[in-house]
Image: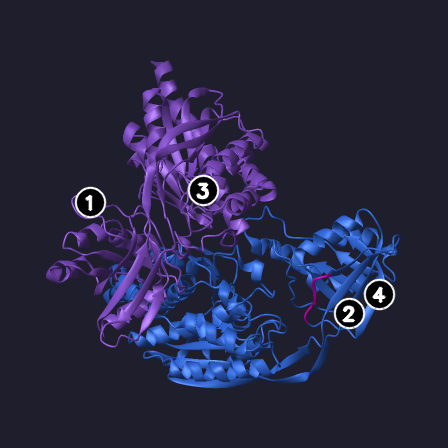
Chain colours: A blue, B purple
Amino acid sequence: MKKTLLALLWLPLAAMAQPADDAAAIKKISDEILRNGKAYDLLRQLTKQIGGRLAGSPQFAKAVEWGKITMEQNGADKVFLQECMVPHWVRGGQDKAVITEIDKKKTSRTLDVLALGNSLGSGTVSAQVLAIDDFAELERRKDEVKGKIVYYNHGFDPTNVKPFVSYGQTGQYRGAGPSRAAKYGAVGVMIRSLTESAANDPHTGSTRYNDSFPKIPCIAVGPRDADYVWEMSRKSSFSMSMSTYGHNLPDTIGHNVIAELKGTEFPDQYITIGGHLDSWDVNEGASDDGTGVVHTIEIMRALQAIGYKPKHTLRFVLFANEENGLRGGTKYAAEAKAKNEKHVFALESDAGGFTPRGFSLQVNKEQMAKLNSWIPLLSPYGTFEFTPDGGGADVGPLNRTFGIPVGELIPDPQRYFDLHHARSDVFENVNKRELLLGAVNMAALIYLVDKYGL
Amino acid sequence: MKKTLLALLWLPLAAMAQPADDAAAIKKISDEILRNGKAYDLLRQLTKQIGGRLAGSPQFAKAVEWGKITMEQNGADKVFLQECMVPHWVRGGQDKAVITEIDKKKTSRTLDVLALGNSLGSGTVSAQVLAIDDFAELERRKDEVKGKIVYYNHGFDPTNVKPFVSYGQTGQYRGAGPSRAAKYGAVGVMIRSLTESAANDPHTGSTRYNDSFPKIPCIAVGPRDADYVWEMSRKSSFSMSMSTYGHNLPDTIGHNVIAELKGTEFPDQYITIGGHLDSWDVNEGASDDGTGVVHTIEIMRALQAIGYKPKHTLRFVLFANEENGLRGGTKYAAEAKAKNEKHVFALESDAGGFTPRGFSLQVNKEQMAKLNSWIPLLSPYGTFEFTPDGGGADVGPLNRTFGIPVGELIPDPQRYFDLHHARSDVFENVNKRELLLGAVNMAALIYLVDKYGL
């Protein structure tokens, strides 16, 4: 009885953070990353030497090779490729859109547009434009849709302090907008780009066709051109010629790139850290998600460099296909299940390399309490909150498969949607110190979870 | 007795924030700024139409005129200019530095340099270079200094998570470095620019001569050239020709630009909100401190636009001369004292227009407790902490004169020293949403202080 009591007393004590030791360990990790971090140089390599790397593309295959070699050179105990079939969508040509006022036959303006990812196009579609604000207006005016190109003007609500809330509110127009318009006979769709940026860059991203309706071409238009179109639509009728060439080639072989630091105490229990290696084709995929890729490699490099011996096996994963299929994250979880692996926690970085503000998690109440008890250890590095807003896309399948806690780094979000899926998502828009601090905060959280569990 | 007790009960209650009402009021302020904010457009005007505006320059006079008109157009009850004498330093020419290896007489490289503000120069000085790390090395090697140009290589410590800590540690080389070297007979000084930026832009900023020693010319060198110089200095001896032309014209008339929203309950008690209108001459003064200027105007505009009636008189001040003299802030406090004004609180913005993280204050323990009780009202907008690290430079004299609490907005600091006093401090390096959120958080704090006191 006495023994049991002691054990009961002992267990919670062992599971509690020891502030002084842990503060010193985290400082050591931080100093290593801020002093010797390679993340910024690695990001330059990935973005400038390889560039855009949509799943299935030759650039993606190059990125896999780069990822494998880079992980091997930066301290991995072991690196392996995990094969998974990925979609192979190609843009197929130069997206274009020109609008002309119907009455006057004189005004014509070329808009800056990009076809949506996964969309199908086989040349030019010309039709009158029905410009509407949202789905409610689509339903009210469904009888006017037939034979027209529908333009959804619905934009970000600037009063949302968190731009991801705005993205959540407007993302449905990119995803479901084309099929919902096709249902009523539309021949094409254009959406306002999902951004509040003052620049005119259009922002691509996946659409999802509903197989019940015709798969009509669809494009996103730059914000300033969107303003122009919307203003004109209030005054006059106009037509648009939109040219797109998107099509799907057969699914092809892709790879998750996986590195390990072997656990000393629980080698068969896994903590996963990752970002996605693929990106859209129109940019360098710097903030989406080159920063997550180099965060992942940097954490591994730094832990190895300071001689850290993890209790659990740490898996560093560059996921194959987040943007237009989530096949990488899905495969990783399926393989883990097939091999009956034991997973403890998974953390990803897929919201940019900006100054960290905290983490978003899918955890239970007790786990959240434990995380909150670590805030004093993390706050010197920027993390001041854990929010219950779920993990990221690529660790989602692990959560759904095993019910394990998952999380995502939350960097400052204000600039993310200026770059997200736009041509402006390039290396130059990433700041070295902000990038390194993301790795510091992630590594510190991994250290705590590895030491105390979650 | 009963009455007294009631009064005692009533007072603290009245002074406590009423969460629901206050949350709604702050949301109204935030929505107004995020939806209709003019700060970004005003910053474009100030930076692109006027540009660099060192105190005493014709551009500074233009900025005063712009500030007055802009404040008048954006809701002020009253705008006035407060005259103060300001220094009138001019760069006087094209700063230049060329280094040559002494032994080989062949390597010569032109460095990217800027003379330090307030420094004096009258042409070209050529001498052998003594490259040292810090003041300790200067003291150890003082016998070697005579007739040489001293180069201080001391840079930012990258392991400081807060770059302002690094600035605090290295600022002494810019301020005191020239005179400390002149004391031992140096004929010129070059410092490593106060930045961790990966770019090669040199960063100017004020030096402070000690009148006891010769006022030798001094320059800051870009970080990449600094690396080159330091590396070369480990291998060989070299000389440098540095050309600078800085000189002081007679002090001239400058102005603080002051606008008011009249208090309804305590019209003779003042809350001050401000930023400094002057900037260095080599850039557009966008983040230092155009953002503080437009924060100030935006807060006034938004409070007026939503019909807010302040209890205290709110003073919106564009200070005349922070960069090389602090004459504006000093004059403002001196006038307040001369007129026996009652000041309650002063808040400034002089750390950039990046996403806000909190405020730094000079307050007592009770005031800090009160501020902390407001965190739940401010955190939806980004503010998660108040730190006791003091107010900014321009509100410092008010604090020293009246002992009143003062504070400064703390935006994310990671990018500030990439731009600070460098050519890269331009409009394009400011993000609209980040900028507006700074005004939101400041306005919310002002609302709370105006309502509940501090």
Identity of the residue drawn at 43% across and 36% down: B274
* SS under mark 1: loop
- Work out whether residue A228 or residue B200 is closer to the camera in this orientation and state it: B200
Q: Is residue B415 visible?
A: yes
**Is A410 left or right of B33, judged from the image as shown?**
left
Mark 3 lies on residue: B292
Circles 2 and 4, Cβ within 8 Å, touching? The answer is: no
* SS under mark 3: helix
Question: Label 2 neighbourhood size at 10 Å, few (<14), some (14-19), many (20+)?
Answer: many
Q: Give the quarter of the image for residue B111.
A: bottom left
Label ID, residue B210 = 1
The residues tagged by marks 3 and 1 sit, at their Cα atoms, a distance apart of 31 Å
- Magenta stretch: includes residue B138: no
Circles 4 and 1, Cβ within 8 Å, touching? The answer is: no
Question: Label 4 neighbourhood size at 10 Å, few (<14), some (14-19), many (20+)?
Answer: some
> Which amino acid type is marked by label 4?
Ser
Q: x%, y% of residue B73?
A: 58, 31
> Which amino acid type is marked by label 1?
Asn
Label ID, residue A126 = 4
Looking at the image, tell me whether mark 2 or mark 4 is earlier in sequence order.
Answer: 4
Q: Do the residues at pointers 4 and 1 share their chain?
A: no
